[in-house]
Image: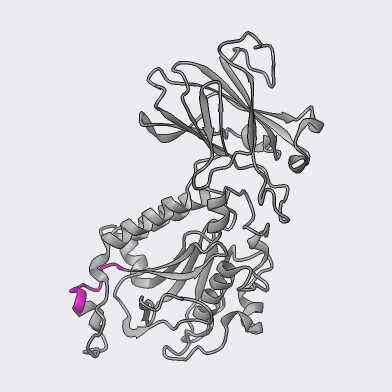
């Protein structure tokens, strides 16, 4: 969406952007400042009513999730009080009562996101019939006021969002930086036989010590929109073998990239994030853990890498993230409800995540056991590894030499 009102340009035409329409209540050139929503004492210089798009807006899958908004404003004059009324929000009063507020950043002057200082007001919309028919559904109005800084010029771009964003593009940029940082561990095409049971050809090729960081990124699958669903593998070189993980049924389509190495004597910890695209704090928890586990000098990270192989999926719902959805994917599906019986044709990321968890639970008793059948179709593994609400935090039972797959979804 892109529109210009009173010399100010509004746009949501970017990754994770969301804005349906906008109308001007009053501006700096009129005196109609008596329009009031909420309990603000200062009359704003500019006031706008905005509507956010529901998930899957304009399609047969449209639903009532309307909390996420993310848009940019260009041409805002300096030192002006601007009031935004999001007219069709889902009820978020409890969050705002606990201190949450929308976030803002100004480019190029203030590139870091910060919360809007004035406390937002959330109240039931009084004129439901005035809303477009495809946006109606118990709407609430969220009103926030923000004063443009004195160095906010006409060329500045101001971004507003429901919460700190982390887009698909930002995620891919982060992973590409990690690829560059750890490119010394890229494997050669043809390697020699393993020399002994303690040293793998990968160690020799990379000249790595046992405590060096093993990092491997691979394409787990594509989303319905064709976006990457990545799988990261992080560990130390303790227990590394000259064997690769198998290509599970329907997964790992990029044949030019080798699968991650297999490890002996280590448990597997599975971590995923953003099954609900609007729950952006999950990405910052994920990124914080990823940053921690990749610290080369931290003794805690070193010990964890010695004991575990970490399998991590940064974005389980990249389509919803890129489209600016709050809770569902491009077909209006809450993917967190699909773990019981995921269909690769409709829920590829959940199918893939479940396959990884079941594989590392079921096929870890014998290091070279083949994996020929689809992992998600194993009923016994499904019963033991799975809750109907998806993996939240479980430690799977293990006996004898069987390793434990610990899985967590943020």
| Residue at position x 56%, y 59% in the image | 317
**170 up-or-down from 141: above or below:** below
Magenta highlight range? 205-214
Q: Main secondary structure of the magenta part?
A: loop
- Does the magenta segment cover residue 82? no
Can residue 69 be seen from the camera position used here?
yes
Location of residue 167 in the rendering, given as x and y in whole percent from the top left corner: 48, 49
| Residue at position x 60%, y 73% in the image | 344
How is the structure coloured here?
A: one colour
Location of residue 127 in the rendering, given as x and y in whole percent from the top left corner: 79, 28
Can residue 300 be seen from the camera position used here?
no
**325 up-or-down from 52: above or below:** below
With 191 as the anchor, is 404 left or right in this view?
right
- The quarter holding residue 189 reads bottom left
Report the label total. 0
Q: Outermost residue toward the right?
A: 129
Nearer to the camera, 283 or 145: 145
Location of residue 365 in the rendering, given as x and y in whole percent from the top left corner: 48, 87
**385 up-or-down from 325: above or below:** below
**29 up-or-down from 243: above or below:** above
- The quarter holding residue 22 reads top right
Nearer to the camera, 355 or 319: 319
| Residue at position x 57%, y 82% in the image | 375
- Does the magenta segment cover residue 213? yes
With 388 as the anchor, is 221 left or right in this view?
left
Quarter of the picture containing the C terminus is bottom right
Quarter of the picture containing the N terminus is top right
Q: Outermost residue toward the top?
A: 31
């Amino acid at each position: 969406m892109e529109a210009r009102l009173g010399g100010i340009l509004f746009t949501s035409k970017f990754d994770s952007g969301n804005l349906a329409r906008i109308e001007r209540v009053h501006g700096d050139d009129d005196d109609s400042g008596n329009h009031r929503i909420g309990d603000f004492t200062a009359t704003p210089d500019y006031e706008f009513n905005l509507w956010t798009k529901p998930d899957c807006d304009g399609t047969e899958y449209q639903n009532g999730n309307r909390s996420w908004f993310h848009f940019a404003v260009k041409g805002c004059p300096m030192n002006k009080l601007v009031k935004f009324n999001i007219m069709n929000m889902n009820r978020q009063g409890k969050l705002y009562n606990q201190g949450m507020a929308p976030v803002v950043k100004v480019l190029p002057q203030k590139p870091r996101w910060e919360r809007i200082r004035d406390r937002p007001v959330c109240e039931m919309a009084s004129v439901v019939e005035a809303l477009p028919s495809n946006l109606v559904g118990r709407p609430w109005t969220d009103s926030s006021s923000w004063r443009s800084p004195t160095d906010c010029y006409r060329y500045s771009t101001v971004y507003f969002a429901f919460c700190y964003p982390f887009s698909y593009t930002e995620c891919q940029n982060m992973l590409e930086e990690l690829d560059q940082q750890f490119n010394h561990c890229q494997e050669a095409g043809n390697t020699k036989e393993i020399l002994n049971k303690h040293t793998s050809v990968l160690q020799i090729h990379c000249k790595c010590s046992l405590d060096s960081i093993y990092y491997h990124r691979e394409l787990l699958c594509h989303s319905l929109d064709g976006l990457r669903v990545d799988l990261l593998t992080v560990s130390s070189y303790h227990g590394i073998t000259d064997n690769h993980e198998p290509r599970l049924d329907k997964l790992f389509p990029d044949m030019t990239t080798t699968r991650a190495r297999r490890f002996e004597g280590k448990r597997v910890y599975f971590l995923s994030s953003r099954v609900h695209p609007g729950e952006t704090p999950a990405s910052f928890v994920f990124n914080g853990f990823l940053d921690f586990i990749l610290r080369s000098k931290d003794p805690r990270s070193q010990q964890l890498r010695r004991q575990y192989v970490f399998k991590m999926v940064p974005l389980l719902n990249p389509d919803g993230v890129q489209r600016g959805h709050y809770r569902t994917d491009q077909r209006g599906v809450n993917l967190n409800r699909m773990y019981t019986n995921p269909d690769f044709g409709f829920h590829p990321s959940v199918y893939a995540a479940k396959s990884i968890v079941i594989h590392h639970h079921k096929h870890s008793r014998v290091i070279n056991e083949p994996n020929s059948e689809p992992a998600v179709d194993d009923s016994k593994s499904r019963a033991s590894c799975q809750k109907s609400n998806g993996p939240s935090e479980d430690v799977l039972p293990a006996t004898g030499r069987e390793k434990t797959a610990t899985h967590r979804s943020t």
